[in-house]
Image (cartoon, rainbow, N blue to C red):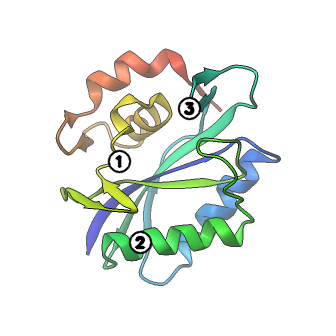
């Protein structure tokens, strides 16, 4: 079994409902065991051009899971949940009803055409770091270390929701 951290976000429709539905599906997916969930935070939309205050705000949370699945198997399972919830991949970093990303997979460093672990942008994302820290004050991002200092820097960029 490997402990992994995943991040969830939604900025369309009933955002909290999408997070709850995704977490429910994750918890009932074979070989994925939900062990912890962070508080929900709200953040401004991040686009390829940067933060965009004109876009709908995101609700985000982080969850810890245990799984025997390999990284690419886990990615497929999480993408199947996104599809089941009607996720449409129209544009990169566009608005979405649900987004689920793998942030860490144990202490593994993994790279394939479809997946990079740890998530290469995790350390730069307040909406990942702050809820993760609120869930686990001793959390560590492989290659970066404890996220406590990052959480202190980013805390003003999100609000508890």
Residue at 19% from the left image edge and 35% from the top image edge: 144
- Separation of marks 1 and 3 at Cα, in angstroms: 16 Å
Residue located at (33% from left, 33% from top) = 123
Going from N to C along the chain, the mark reached first, 2 or 1, is 2
Q: Tag 2 or tag 3, which sits nearer the N-term?
A: 3
Near mark 1 (Cα within 10 A), the count class, few <14, some 14-19 or many ≥20, is some
What is the residue that sits farthest to the bottom in this orientation?
A: 30
Vertical relation: 122 (above or below) 100 = above
What's the residue at 47%, 54% (across, down)?
Answer: 101
Q: Where residue 155 sits: x, y (%)?
A: 46, 20
Q: Eyeballing the image, is 64 above or below 38?
A: below
Q: At numbered mark 3, what does the secondary structure look like: helix, strand or loop?
A: loop
Q: Position of residue 34 (x, y in %)?
A: 45, 66
Q: Is residue 112 above or below residue 53?
A: below
User: In which quarter of the view is residue 49 placed?
Assistant: top right
CB atoms at circles 1 and 3 under 8 Å apart? no
In the image, is 53 to the left or to the right of 107? right
Tag 3 residue: 48
Q: Which residue is mark 2?
A: 74
């Amino acid at each position: 079994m490997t402990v992994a951290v995943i991040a969830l976000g939604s900025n369309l429709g009933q955002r909290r409902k999408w997070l709850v539905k995704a977490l429910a599906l994750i918890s009932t997916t074979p070989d994925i065991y939900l062990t912890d969930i962070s508080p929900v935070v709200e953040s401004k939309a991040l686009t390829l051009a940067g933060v965009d205050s004109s876009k709908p705000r995101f609700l985000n949370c982080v969850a810890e899971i245990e799984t025997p699945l390999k990284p690419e198997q886990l990615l497929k399972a999480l993408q199947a949940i996104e599809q089941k919830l009607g996720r449409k991949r129209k544009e990169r970093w566009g608005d979405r009803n649900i987004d689920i990303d793998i942030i860490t997979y144990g202490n593994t460093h993994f790279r394939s055409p479809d997946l990079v672990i740890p998530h290469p942008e995790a350390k730069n994302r307040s909406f990942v770091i702050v809820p993760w820290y609120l869930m686990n004050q001793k959390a560590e991002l492989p290659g970066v270390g404890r996220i406590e200092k990052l959480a202190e820097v980013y805390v003003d960029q999100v609000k508890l929701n």
